Image: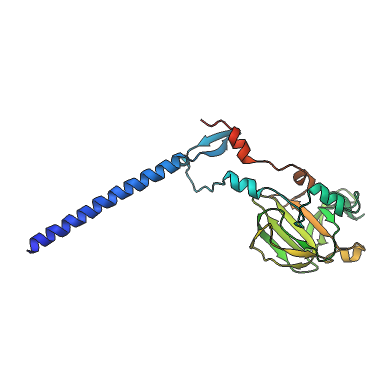
Amino acid sequence: MKVRTIAFIRFLIVLLLLLLVVIDTLIINHLQKKLDQITILTTENDSLIAVSPKALKEKTVLLTPDFIDKFSKYKSPFNDGLTFSQLLEKYVRNRWADLYGAPRGTKKCRRKHEGIDLFVPENTPVYPIADYGIVMQAEDNPHFLIETECKRENGVIDTVKVEYGKIVRILYPEGIETLYAHLNKIFVKTGETVTGNTKVGLTGLTGNIRRSGKPSHLHLELRDAENKTFNPKHRLFFHQGSVKNFLKNLKLE
């Protein structure tokens, strides 16, 4: 009796193992078909190439066209539906002094204006310019200083600390950042993720504008991956593109 019971148990174990092998094979075949549907676009020697996921040798994050098209589109920091051109027309007071590159500082160390000044009423809510972002820095100090490049009278490049006041820096999926300065209040913390509808702060009068005689405004900067500022019009003036449209016309073998 015991021999028959042991044999039956062995039979069940073998049957279960065979069943697991069949199930695993089906799952592997299913996953293989899904992998075969994925094409990865990358570069090699300055050329665009398409590779299979099987060719990857390290952990890779893939972004879908929907992700890129949605999260690389930009909008007004006031969530008011205005284009960048309309923002400049409505909120910039002085086309010479309030735009990127305008001279700043003293004769001892001349610097440039690192962003644009948008003159809106005090305590106007400000939002991210894209639908997804990461707060890289949130400073609640009304006298917060940022080191900025300047040029001495003898032509030597130096740095000077500028009082930005309360600031929020947000990084977007494209890899660029906005920096909002002179805020009265901030509502986010460093490391927090935000959407286009997240109220990150209120415009105000913190930082060096308290001594400038200027009214409340939003100082808006765009920064690259090396934390260098660049002219917002070089990015925000562009029409919004579509990766999906590019892929639709790309001939893949």
Work out whether 113 lies above or below 124.
Answer: above
| Residue 250: quadrant of the picture | top right
Residue 196, how many percent across, how many down? 68, 57
Residue 204, how many percent across, how many down? 82, 65
Residue at x 66% of width, y 54% of height: 131
Coloring applied to the structure:
rainbow
Residue 51, how many percent across, how many down? 50, 37
**Side (left or right) of 65 relative to 130:** left
The N terminus - image quarter: bottom left
Residue 99 seen from this side: no
Residue 73 seen from this side: yes
Residue 71 versus residue 79: which sits nearer the camera?
Answer: 79
Residue 236 versus residue 48: which sits nearer the camera?
Answer: 236
Name the outermost residue toward the left: 1
| Residue 129: quadrant of the picture | bottom right
Work out whether 122 lies above or below 157.
Answer: below
Residue 207, how many percent across, how many down? 83, 65
Name the outermost residue toward the front: 81
Residue at x 82% of width, y 51% of height: 87
**Side (left or right) of 230 relative to 40:** right
Residue at x 69% of width, y 48% of height: 73
